[in-house]
Image (cartoon, rainbow, N blue to C red):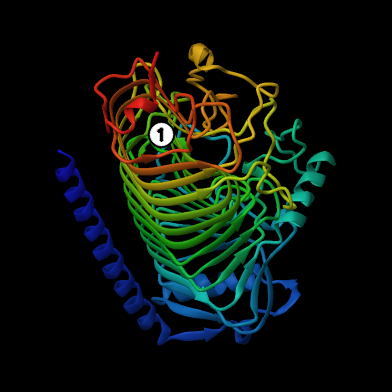
Amino acid sequence: MLKMKRRGKYSLDLLLKSMTLMLILWMDVSASLCAQNRIDVTKHGVVSDGEVVNTKAIQQLIDKESKKGGTTLVFPQGSYLTGSLVMKSNVNIYLEKGAVLLGSTNPMDYEKIEMPGRPESPKKDDNSQMALLVAHKANHFTISGKGTIDGQGRKLALNIDSLHHAGVLIDPKYNYRRHRPNETARPKLVRFSQCNNVRLEGLTMKNSACWGLSFELCKKLVLENLKIENRAYWNNDGMDISDCNNVVVNNCDVNSADDGICLKSYYPGYCNDTIRITNCTIRSSASAIKFGTASFGGFKNVTIDNIKVYDTFRSAIAIESVDGAIIENIEASNIEAKNTGNAIFIRLGHRGGEKPGAIKNVYLHNIQVEIPFGRPDINYDMRGPAVGFFHNPIPSSITGIPGFQVENVKLENIEVTCPGRASKGMAYVPVSRLDQVPNNIKGYPEFTMFGELPSWGMYVRHVNGIEMNNVKFSLTDTDYRPAFVFDQVEKLTIDKLTLPTTTGKSIILKETTKTKINETIEDWCKQL
């Protein structure tokens, strides 16, 4: 059974690699054809002094050239101030070295673009169509070069905040507890919806007032060799990919104040399908790579490979279905995370949607994570929010809810270094009181969502099918808790496992059945 599954994984990986090559080749051919017709924007009324607002001049060029069949708009060295620009089919933008497309800090320069024909989403509280670069049903275009797109997001967000309090531009969803405008009132850097054959390459993209690069319901999307610095304001995700098909994210450097690379699903009946994320470096005040939290449709056939993570507040990888999404056929490999708050977080819950979804067939391998005792982002300007309770270092977790189990998870060649230093005086949930750990069925999915946990390495509950092979968990300092707790787990297989030497039982099994545990490990186990 396992061999069949692994052959399936290799077939999926080969398919995704072939898709990557074909997509990149197609985009290169398309770009070369448009490159034959290039227009220097400064010869058509666009001013590069960083003071004149060029929105109208640039938009007129985009509209005119799209009607003529397409071109490449070239921005030479200089600063080009602009508000919202709407991309059109077959019109490329190329920023030469030293060219900066500068977002206006005047909120009035950003429009909420109508996008008819989009499906209805149950979630409407955090996602708008405002951005510096907007596209709807625009196809076959590239945004590339050696220049920079700078949203000037902090100044823009603070201006939006000031106008709200002055009564000039009221945000009906204003967050008075956190003293900031809602995400729907703040423009993103990029917002593309229902677009096909789109490529972003080579640029530095930074300082959004909200999410950085946002794509939904797009097909054949390539994001390559991008440097993303999104640390200007709250909710500064690096990139968000929602319900898209055939996506390649390759060789990107992401430094974000919120989630680094985030897959979302806002639309029931839709999903992210055939996504490949490779050769990226991520620094985040939240999670490095995350599925969710918006998770209404699904995520399938996702391959993540060769990722470097550092100084990240939450999880190296977080896989979450809490709104009914089906998550299946996920493979993540060759991840190295240093100074990162949590290694692995997999959560099936029921925050929204008609019924809980599913998480199944997840293969994580060749992963190394080093977890510090203190906050990994303590020196950041924009730090992640602290939790409202006292706790010891929180372990990785894989959890479902009663009646809905996470299924078929394989962990192989995993090495996690945990900080230890747990104190019963700080917080204490002994193994005799495992029922004290809440299911938190409707809770926001985060590795801290259960409060204090009774293990230091990994906590597993409501799982059907988990296999661990060549897994090593170590401690920097001592910890009184057991390494692993398995609570209401079926089909547990542990082959090769390395843990620190201890006089107590390192593995706690509660209502855990159909186990297959290497005989050298059996003495470490305690059945409750």
Apparent side of residue 373 relative to residue 359 in the rendered image (left or right): right
Residue at left 47%, top 74%?
92
Secondary structure, mark 1, is: loop
Q: Position of residue 290 (x, y in %)?
A: 48, 45
The image shows residue 125, relative to residue 68, as above or below, that is above
Q: Which residue does the numbered mark 1 point to in the structure image?
A: 296
Label 1 crowd (10 A; few <14 / some 14-19 / many >=20): many
Numbered circles on residues, count: 1
Q: Quadrant of the N terminus?
A: top left
The image shows residue 505, relative to residue 52, as above or below, that is above
Q: Quadrant of residue 446?
A: top right
Q: Quadrant of residue 314?
A: top right
Residue at left 40%, top 13%?
528
Q: Position of residue 106 (x, y in %)?
A: 75, 57
Front residue of 120/514: it is 514
Apparent side of residue 230 relative to residue 355 in the rendered image (left or right): right
Q: Position of residue 59 (x, y in %)?
A: 57, 69
Apparent side of residue 122 relative to residue 165 in the rendered image (left or right): left
